[in-house]
Image (cartoon, coloured by chain):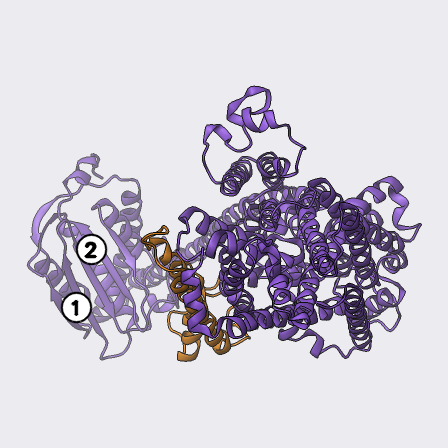
Amino acid sequence: MPGFDLLVAVALGYVAFLFAIAFLAERRAGRGRDAWLRGPVVYTLSLSIYCTAWTFYGAVGNAARSGLEYLTIYLGPSLVMLGWWWMLRKLVRVGRAQRITSIADLVSSRFGKSAGLGGIVTVMCVVGVAPYIALQLQSITLSFAVFAEGAGRVWGPGDIRTVALASAAGLASFAILFGTRNLDADERHHGVVLAIAVEAVVKLAALLAVGGFVVWGIGGGVGETLERIDASAIARWDQGAGRWIGLTMLSAAAFVCLPRMFQVLVVENADEGHLRTASWAFPLYLMAMSLFVVPIAVTGLALLPEGNPDLFVLTVPLSQGEGGLATLAFLGGFSSATSMVIVATIALATMVSNHVVLPIWLRARGGGATMSGDVRAVTLRARRASIAGVLGLGYLYFRVTGGGAALTAIGLISFVGVAQILPAMLGGLFWRGATRAGAASALVTGFAVWMWTMFLPGVGGVMPASVVAEGPFGIAALRPGALFGIAGVDPVLHAFAWSMALNAGVFVAVSLLTFPAPLERLQGAQFVDVFAHSLGPGRVVTSTAQAEDLLIMAQRIVGAGRAQAVFRDAARDQGHARALPDVTPGFVQSLERELAGSVGAATAHAMVGQLTEGAAVSVEDLIAVADEAAQIVEYSNRLEAKSAEQERTARALRDANAKLTALSLQKDAFLGQVSHELRTPMTSIRAFSELLREGGLTPEDGRRYAGIVEDEARRMTRLLDDLLDLSVLEHGQVALRPAEIRIGDLIGRAVAAATGERALDVTVSGALDAVVVTDPDRLAQVVINVVSNAAKYCARPDARLWIEVEAGADDVAITLRDDGPGIAEDARDLIFEKFARAGDPARAGGAGLGLAIAREVMHRLGGRIDCLPQKGGAAFRVTLPRQTDDVSGLVTVAV
Amino acid sequence: MSPRPVFLARGRYRQRRLRDGLRMLPVLGAVLWMVPLMWPRGQAAGQGNAGALVYVFGVWALLVILGAVMAGRLRPDGDGVDGDG
């Protein structure tokens, strides 16, 4: 049995050793040589702060009382770590992308950087973790008491209080010294992390040493130990499904929600890759920690049936006279307690300063807060005071509860308390529709139910016995142990199930019914889709907030050196040689994130907002602007559509105008042509008739001259006939004489009439047997017109013409193609107009009325004639109905 | 969202299935650790805690080994960020 004073000396020496390690680590990190400090091994070991004195002492006590139930506390976190791909990966990515400083910051940042939400979570965590800290103080005190008792001094309550107070004070100074030395830009604490990694090794080694001693030293090997378990009081498997599953879920939830776990898992994470190693290495650590718990418990029960099972880890070696081993076990328990308290208080202090003190202070100082006073000093002071306050609260809880309750029970109260954050956290990470109102109401609901069903009944004497037994004001439905009259449930499960069910229910219901603010929606997208885009939400700076002002503010928060480095880097990235960057939206955003790494998202947002106020447009403004812009865009779209329509109309008008102009020109040209056509024969007639009148001609000459006169007169007549014909057709004053005719016959007749002596190779094909009822003479006129046009324009001796007939059900189409010069594209519109002629008028030889007449005829016949676009040669299609009687009915007047 | 490719190179395909396996690991663990709940309970006829202890720790070791092997084979770069196809 080591002397008590020696033990105190060992404990103090151990603390000094931890101080030295933390100090060296800080110094190495300060020189930038921290690569090995931030490796996956240290990361995994730092997670071991999950295993507190509750594990070290309490697990054995739990096993001695409830068999294997203690395992659930480690199975849950093992599953969470092994399932890192589901959640932790995302959590760590979000934490790094958003520079999250604590779990309160996570919830606050996710739901629109809400200061209120951060405050709620902070209060919940402080209240929830206080029992846990009390538990650590209790275990330190109890372990000291064991040695004091061994030295022959039985402690009274006063001694216990003194030791607890001294422990709290010592832990507070360690946490203050290494947790608030500086305001790291990323809120990482190299010294603390390395110290807790060392403590992780010490507590594992201690527990394994005690376990090894129990199994091989006392038990005589693995086989014998298993036999002893089967022979012990906890030999039989009797775990109820409710507690086994419920506590596993509870420990899994608490694992990610405990502020200290969030601190080491997310905030202190230096590299996402470390999670990959920790995902299996940490379950391995937990397995090793729980491996010898049952053997120790069984041995303790056998050797010390009257002893406190929570202290078997110490008392079993002591009872065997193994003073050295007991001292190692004491150090292990001491490590478990101190590392938990240090990290928990640092995490809570960060939350309290960032989410309670700073917002209040900023509000109290009004708008000028960022310009005057040292935010940095205020933050550090707030943190130091918070650490002391949190430890004080833990001590107070320890005093109030009397330190009597079993360790397991106290730990579970804490677990259920912090698990209330889980719905808001999971919803925030995976559900875009989660809103701030939903999260706030859920947190408050869960917290209230936990308070009522677990915390208040657990703190001895706070809740009157009558309320516990009969409910408040005799309302049985509100009895803390049997909400809504459902009694007989295990108290922990009762509190856990009701608080989580109401919490999650309220969260979903309120989220569905409320509408998130723009910043919430932006942050929601950032969190939920963190793997898709890790860009920040926008704050648009419309004019320049002075870079100097921002620099002064940043210096007050993160320190002069760091702030200047940030500004210099930003300026360099923008391509400036000078020290100050332009105040671009991107810069303001990255600066805000940088500051958020020290004071939390909500505070950083508020502080940067104060400086850029007026200069910066809030997201709400932006949305309003966007709405307006959308209206303008829509209006301009409509204008554009309208103007496009007008454009189309104008183009049609232009086309019509061009056509009219062309026609008018054609008309003028035609009048000239008609005059010319009429004058030429007239001149000939006059000249030859004068010669005939003067006489003295040979009879042969006389006959020849008379023939010329006759020919010319006939030409004039034909011209006049055409003009008349067209005029009649155009005015509908034409009588049709419908008759049944075979298309083949009609085409044969027309071709013969049109070509005459002209050698044109005509190929006729298709449905020549089709029979139509139409005016054969008029139709023939059209075909003749087209064929003679072809004959006229195709000057080559081997010119060809193809005529093809297609017979449909209701109409017949005759297509006429030649291989002549064809019709220019721009002329196609005009050739059917009166007086129009394509190409050289001299060659046409006619007055240009042929196609105009053809069109009018086809129109009268109920059909149409089209000029088909074709390369090489002209092509016309004549389409006519099988029956034209309805048209003929209209015709009333004959010429 | 750009359409995700239907066919992947063998290496990337393996990586995707590896992630599926990682996702399933906690499910496997939860199921295996709930198996003892189906054992007979009570002091008289119940299964021995020694056997239960061996079973629970055996599952634990299996999960740690599976987790270590899969995490070790996972390429850290991570194609297509959250692609799970």
In the rendered structure, the answer to whether residue A504 lies left or right of residue A199 reads: left
Between residue B1 and residue A705, name the one nearer to us. Answer: B1
- Amino acid type at circle 2 is Gln
Instruction: Name the amino acid type tagged 1.
Output: Gly
Badge number at residue A584: none
Q: Are marks 1 and 2 in contact (CB under 8 Å)?
A: no
Residue A781 badge = 2
Q: From what the image shows, is residue A645 above or below residue A815?
A: above
How many numbered dots are placed on residues in this image?
Answer: 2
Question: Looking at the image, which is closer to me, A623 or A9?
Answer: A9
The quadrant the N terminus of chain A occupies is bottom right
Question: Which residue is more in the foreground, A396 or A872?
Answer: A396
Instruction: Categorize mark 1 by other alpha carbons within 10 Å: few (<14), some (14-19), many (20+).
Output: few
- The chain holding disc 2 is A
Q: Position of residue A521 (x, y in %)?
A: 61, 47
Where A462 falls versus A349 (above or below)? Answer: above
Q: Which corner quadrant of the image does residue A873 belong to? A: bottom left
Q: Which residue is mark 1?
A: A756
Instruction: Give the structural element (helix, strand or loop) at label 2.
Output: helix
Chain letter for the purple colouring in the rendering: A
Task: Identify which residue is drawn at 27% across, 74% down.
Answer: A819
